Image (cartoon, rainbow, N blue to C red):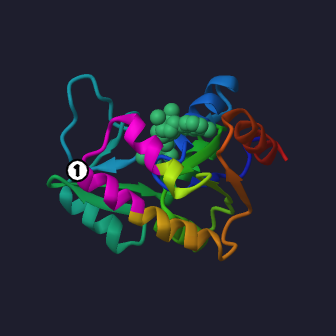
Amino acid sequence: MPGRPIVVSGPSGTGKSTLLKRLFAEYPGKFGFSVSNTTRKPRPGEKDGVDYNFVSVDQFKQLVADGAFIEWAQFSGNYYGTTIAAVKKVSEGLKRTCVLDIDMQGVKSVKKTDLNARFVFVAPPSLEELKKRLEGRGTETAESLSKRLSAAEAELEFAKTGAHDKVIVNDNLESAYKELNEFIFA
Ligand SMILES: Nc1ncnc2c1ncn2[C@@H]1O[C@H](COP(=O)(O)OP(=O)(O)OP(=O)(O)O)[C@@H](O)[C@H]1O
């Protein structure tokens, strides 16, 4: 029996991917991510329904109008989004526990659906440490770094409202992973 969907959120750079990568590796076949919808064209080797659900702009707009999305966005001329149906497909089709790595808008949106998800927030030990990790990852420009840090403050404020079932401070990676594991299998 797959478990209820798990929504993992928290500031960019707080360590969500690091923790999830470890979880997926420890339990192969137990968890899965949903397949996103996109209007961009498939790249060679990409399979429809596996890498993405490839749709036309008209189809995408219809899904938006139908309220099918948990979250969607436009990047460099293409639309991308996660549908409620794609999350259900992971549990009902693949019989896996669906894990969603989304931001606070996504969290609010999932709460309005019938997905009956559980919410975990991964917090950094401090904003200074978060800045160090983002710098250390070597993926950010000065501009994207400052954008992520201001978004981080909003995420931390939101977490204070008690919207999540569990808050994990990712200070020591081992103990954060242990807490995540315990929460997920509780
Ligand atoms: N407990 C920890 N102590 C020190 N460094 C950590 C810890 N956890 C993660 N990191 C490092 O912090 C950086 C950011 O981690 P990661 O990429 O997992 O964050 P993220 O929350 O998934 O970010 P994004 O939302 O941008 O994808 C990585 O370089 C990672 O190795």
Answer with the quarter of the image where residue 60 lies: bottom left
In the displayed structure image, the side of residue 84 where residue 55 appears, left or right:
left
- The answer to whether residue 142 is above or below residue 133 is below
Q: Quadrant of the N terminus?
A: top right
Q: Which residue is drawn at 72% across and 32% down?
A: 174
Between 4 and 54, which is closer to the camera in this rendering?
Answer: 4
Q: Give the range drawn in magenta.
A: 131-149
Residue 51 visible in this rendered orientation of the protein: yes
Whole-percent x and y of residue 138? 34, 35
Q: In this view, does 152 lie above or below 139?
A: below
* 60 with respect to 36 (left or right): left
- Give the number of callouts: 1
Q: Nearer the viewer, residue 91 or 130?
A: 130
Q: Magenta region, mostly helix, strand or loop?
A: helix
Q: Nearer the viewer, residue 122 or 131?
A: 131
Q: Which residue carries the number 1 mark? A: 39
Residue placed at 29% from the left, 67% from the top? 62
**Residue 114 to residue 140: above or below:** below
Other-residue count near label 1 (Cα within 10 Å), few / some / many at <14 / 14–19 / ≥20: many
Q: Is residue 52 magenta?
A: no
Q: Where is residue 126 in the image (x, y as percent from the top left)?
A: 57, 55
Q: Determine the image quadrant of residue 97.
A: top right
Q: Which residue lies most toward the bottom here? A: 161
Q: What amino acid does circle 1 point to?
A: Thr
Horizontal arrangement in the rendering, residue 19 relative to residue 109 (left or right): right
**For the view shown, which residue lies furthest in the left direction?**
77
Observer-nearest residue: 49 or 151? 151
Which residue in the rendered view is the most extreme toward the front?
A: 128
Q: Residue at the spot x=55%, y=46% of the render? A: 89
> From what the image shows, is residue 1 above or below residue 24?
below
